């Protein structure tokens, strides 16, 4: 019964979304205020109905209702409660329902929080948001219904893939979706502005908080996913340039570019067409990502052919949304008035450079991700594009970005002097060079990766500190505390990027590893630590059985701690997973994995031990970036609608 | 039968199952944006060569070779049986005295360019390798033109601010503090 109610709520949500997509649009065109007002309650209703549907599916999972096909194939009665709940989105249908839930949530938020938006802009934005929602609700209902019943329910379920039975699944997808579905808001605002033919500083102010929120969630989502891979996969890899990862990374790069150029529109009323284009591209990349992940196209062409309806349906959504918005852009953008003037050396020019580098980097990821497919269609050539390509082709653009960042962040608007800005930044540059030289000398004979990465990190962080200092002037601490939160946010986000660069460089350059067959009692030394393999003991988990190894770690004579890696066997899916034991620290992670018993010597086990210096800074950096975003978001200037109260005084730049 | 011949026969059998394995991987792995690809204890202790220099070269080469039945994983990262066979093959060639490039060529001859995670700099891959730099140049040129046009005095001399704009500047300046 509950499943049927959920299904019914989903159908009603589709109806509400259709109403939301059509009525306000007509209303805005005909200037009928009552039609325009339909958007708000419709958006709220679509959200409430989708939420009800989501709750129904969650209930089915929590109560292990195996008459629902999705529950039977993805859950099990013995699974811990956390994974019963997170299992709701650990599959195709459920994760799409979560996608739609978040989409309608953003629609409802625009309706609820955008009280001060001009009525027509709000109506059109809600209409576009409603159209996207309707498309995906239709996709869900017609190709991926999560509420299908089984005529003969099994006694127990098929269980969730054991690799997904991890707290990572509970948090990573929701954050990721809040991020890349969040970009739909910027898209809706951009399309609404194009229909209206008007983009001005006030528009940029309304869009920026939404783009900022989406970027922030995306940052957290990607970082969580990366950390999950790091501890779960068992060799401490944290980024694989997998098509599915790239699908989330491309919108992140586009959103980062969008945030920066929206500042230019807001402060200087220029770069308007480009900002609109980026808002469209950002969400298009989200849709492309959804298409890549959901169709299985890039993992295997065969998977796509085996279930073409889903792939074709999303492809159709993609073509209509991207094609339609780009056509609208080509038609309307030339009518947008060009903006204010600025000199060659100015904040504006540097933000243009920022956007150029981020966009090209994004394009490289897109090329690398799609090229195997393009080559196969072009000349039948089968190629692989993996991490070694991306490391080589992507990194130079990020290095260039890191080099120009502190200068661009500090140079004045409109007209500045690069030389003058550089003179103020010299302490950061000097420190960066000095530390790089020191590192180079200390690590004798290893790659230049670590010194270069560390120099860039110091340059960025030092630059951010100097900029904050310059903003304060002689005002002292009191003034520092009174700085606008947006300034704090900017400094924090840039520092976060520096920290991440530092973590990546240090980890990649200095990691050490030992792979051995060990008998209990033996000791291995690597990276300045000694690991003693004490014992292996059996262990019973809630829905698995395990072998647990015990290792004692020493540095010199001092005992550092005990690490207990596990090897788990899940009987329902007949899968073995390995749980690495990690001793986390700010300076290094000690990472131990227990492998199989050796055939040649049954008392010995395969063991992998890593010492990973500064690994955690990669994710700390990402969190600091996201916190910087949050800080900016709480700036009073960006509180949603803050600009609207001044809208009458802000001269709108009409297109016509 | 000599061990290399046996190894190669096993490889052929496994590649036959590659299609089924790929489908299985899709069925299992595609549920999430970051669905982990498998528990791993990729390089086994018994594979490791005694000569550390040779082993380091083996690791370097393996990181750039694709495990043919996996989702975008290198043989160095993968715990699939096929990946193990390929790792052994790489080490066997190195012990036999091949250079790194000879090992790569050997693998490409047998499994096609698909085995390389870093495609070659061939004509067919021009777009892949030079797409980024070309875009940077084109975008750089377009930005340069845009910025030049935006220079004060580039077009008509910048007009003095209107009263409305002055009011807006004042409003924005108030906001700065």
Image: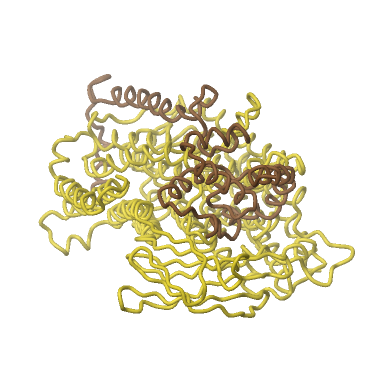
Along the line of sight, which residue is nearer the eye, A422 or A544? A544
Q: Residue A376, located in which quarter of the rendered image?
A: top right
Which residue shows up at 54% across the image and 52% down it? Answer: B77
Looking at the rendered image, the quarter that the C terminus of chain B falls into is bottom left
Q: Is residue A549 left or right of residue A545?
A: left
Residue furthest toward the front?
B1
Along the line of sight, which residue is nearer the eye, B71 or A599? A599
Q: Is residue A118 left or right of residue A480?
A: right
Residue A466 drawn at (x, y percent): 18, 51
- Give above or below for A141 relative to A649: below
Along the line of sight, which residue is nearer the eye, B114 or A173? B114
Residue A407 drawn at (x, y percent): 23, 41
- Give above or below for B80 relative to A568: above
Chain in brown colour: B
Q: How is the image coloured?
A: by chain
Looking at the rendered image, the quarter that the N terminus of chain B falls into is top right
Residue furthest toward the top?
B155
Q: Residue A340, located in which quarter of the rendered image?
A: top left
Residue B156 drawn at (x, y percent): 26, 19
- Give above or below for B48 relative to A25: below
Which residue shows up at 55% across the image and 31% down it? Answer: A326
Residue A267 drawn at (x, y percent): 31, 41
Which residue shows up at 61% across the image and 40% down it? Answer: A25
Residue furthest toward the left?
A474
Residue A184 visible in rendering: no
Q: How many marks?
A: 0
Chain in yellow colour: A
Residue A573 visible in rendering: yes
């Amino acid at each position: 019964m509950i499943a049927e109610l959920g299904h019914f709520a989903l159908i009603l949500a589709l109806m509400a979304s259709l109403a939301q997509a059509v009525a306000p649009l007509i209303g805005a065109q005909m200037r009928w205020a009552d039609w325009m007002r339909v958007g708000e309650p419709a958006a709220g209703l679509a959200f409430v109905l989708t939420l009800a549907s989501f709750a129904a599916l969650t209930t089915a999972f929590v109560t292990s209702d195996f008459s629902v096909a999705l529950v039977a194939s993805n859950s099990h009665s013995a699974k811990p409660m956390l994974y019963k709940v997170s299992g709701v989105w650990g599959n195709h249908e459920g994760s799409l329902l979560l996608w739609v839930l978040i989409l309608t949530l953003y629609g409802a938020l625009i309706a609820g929080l955008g009280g001060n938006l001009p009525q027509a802009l709000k109506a059109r934005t809600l209409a576009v948001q409603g159209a996207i929602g309707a498309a995906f609700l239709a996709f869900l209902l017609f190709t991926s219904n999560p509420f299908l019943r089984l005529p003969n329910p099994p006694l127990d379920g098929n269980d969730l893939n054991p690799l997904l039975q991890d707290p990572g699944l509970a948090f990573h997808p929701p954050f990721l979706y809040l991020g890349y579905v969040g970009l739909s808001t910027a898209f809706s605002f951009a399309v609404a502005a194009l229909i209206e033919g008007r983009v001005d500083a006030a528009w940029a102010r309304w869009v920026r908080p939404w783009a900022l929120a989406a970027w922030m969630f995306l940052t957290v989502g990607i970082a969580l996913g990366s950390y999950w891979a790091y501890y779960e996969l068992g060799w401490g890899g944290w980024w694989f340039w997998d098509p599915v990862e790239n699908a989330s990374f491309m919108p992140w790069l586009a959103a980062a570019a969008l945030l920066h150029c929206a500042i230019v529109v807001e402060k200087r009323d220029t770069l308007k067409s480009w900002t609109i284009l980026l808002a469209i591209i950002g969400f298009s990349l989200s849709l492309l990502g959804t298409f890549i992940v959901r169709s299985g196209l890039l993992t295997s062409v065969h998977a796509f052919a085996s279930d073409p309806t889903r792939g074709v349906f999303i492809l159709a959504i993609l073509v209509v949304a991207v094609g339609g918005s780009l056509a609208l852009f080509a038609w309307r953008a030339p009518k947008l008035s060009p903006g204010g003037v600025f000199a060659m050396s100015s904040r504006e020019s540097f933000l243009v450079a920022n956007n150029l580098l981020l966009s090209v980097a994004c394009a490289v990821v897109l090329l690398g991700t799609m090229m195997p497919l393009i080559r196969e269609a072009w000349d039948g050539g089968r190629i692989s594009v993996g991490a070694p390509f991306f490391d080589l082709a992507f990194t130079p653009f990020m290095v260039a970005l890191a080099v120009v960042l502190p200068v661009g962040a500090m140079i004045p608007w409109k007209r500045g002097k690069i030389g003058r800005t550089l003179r103020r930044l010299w302490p950061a540059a000097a420190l960066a060079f000095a530390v790089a030289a020191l590192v180079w000398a200390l690590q004798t004979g290893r790659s230049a990766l670590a010194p270069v990465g560390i120099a860039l990190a110091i340059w960025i962080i030092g630059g951010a500190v100097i900029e904050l200092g310059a903003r304060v002037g002689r005002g002292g601490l009191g003034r520092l505390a009174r700085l606008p939160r947006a300034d704090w946010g900017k400094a924090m986000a840039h520092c976060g990027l520096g920290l991440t660069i530092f973590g990546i460089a240090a980890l990649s350059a200095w990691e050490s590893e030992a792979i051995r067959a060990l008998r209990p009692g033996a000791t291995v030394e690597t990276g300045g630590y000694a690991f003693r393999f004490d014992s292996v003991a059996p262990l019973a988990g809630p829905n698995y059985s395990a072998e647990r190894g015990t290792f004692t770690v020493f540095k010199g004579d001092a005992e550092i701690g005990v690490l207990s890696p596990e090897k788990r066997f899940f009987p329902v899916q007949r899968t073995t997973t390995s749980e690495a034991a990690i001793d986390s620290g700010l300076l290094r992670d000690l990472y131990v994995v227990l492998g199989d018993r050796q055939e040649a010597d049954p008392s010995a086990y395969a063991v992998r031990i890593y010492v990973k210096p500064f690994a955690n800074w990669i994710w700390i950096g990402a969190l600091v970036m996201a916190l910087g975003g949050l800080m900016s978001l709480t700036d009073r200037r960006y509180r949603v609608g803050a600009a609207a109260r001044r809208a009458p005084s802000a001269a709108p730049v009409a297109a016509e | 039968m000599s061990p290399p011949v046996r190894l190669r026969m096993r490889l052929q059998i496994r590649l036959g199952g590659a299609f089924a394995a790929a489908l299985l991987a899709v069925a299992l792995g595609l549920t999430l944006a970051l669905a982990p690809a498998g528990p791993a204890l990729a390089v086994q202790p018994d594979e490791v060569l005694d000569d550390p220099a040779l082993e380091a070269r083996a690791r370097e080469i393996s990181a750039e070779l694709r495990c043919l039945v996996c989702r975008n994983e290198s043989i160095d990262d993968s715990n699939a049986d096929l990946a193990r066979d390929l790792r052994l093959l790489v080490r066997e060639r190195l012990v036999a005295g091949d250079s790194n490039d000879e090992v790569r060529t050997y693998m490409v001859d047998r499994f096609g360019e698909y085995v390389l995670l870093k495609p070659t700099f061939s004509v067919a891959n021009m777009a892949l390798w030079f797409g980024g730099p070309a875009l940077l140049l084109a975008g750089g040129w377009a930005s340069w033109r845009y910025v030049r046009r935006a220079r004060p005095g580039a077009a008509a001399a910048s007009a003095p601010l209107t009263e409305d704009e002055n009011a807006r500047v004042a409003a924005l300046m108030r906001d700065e503090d």
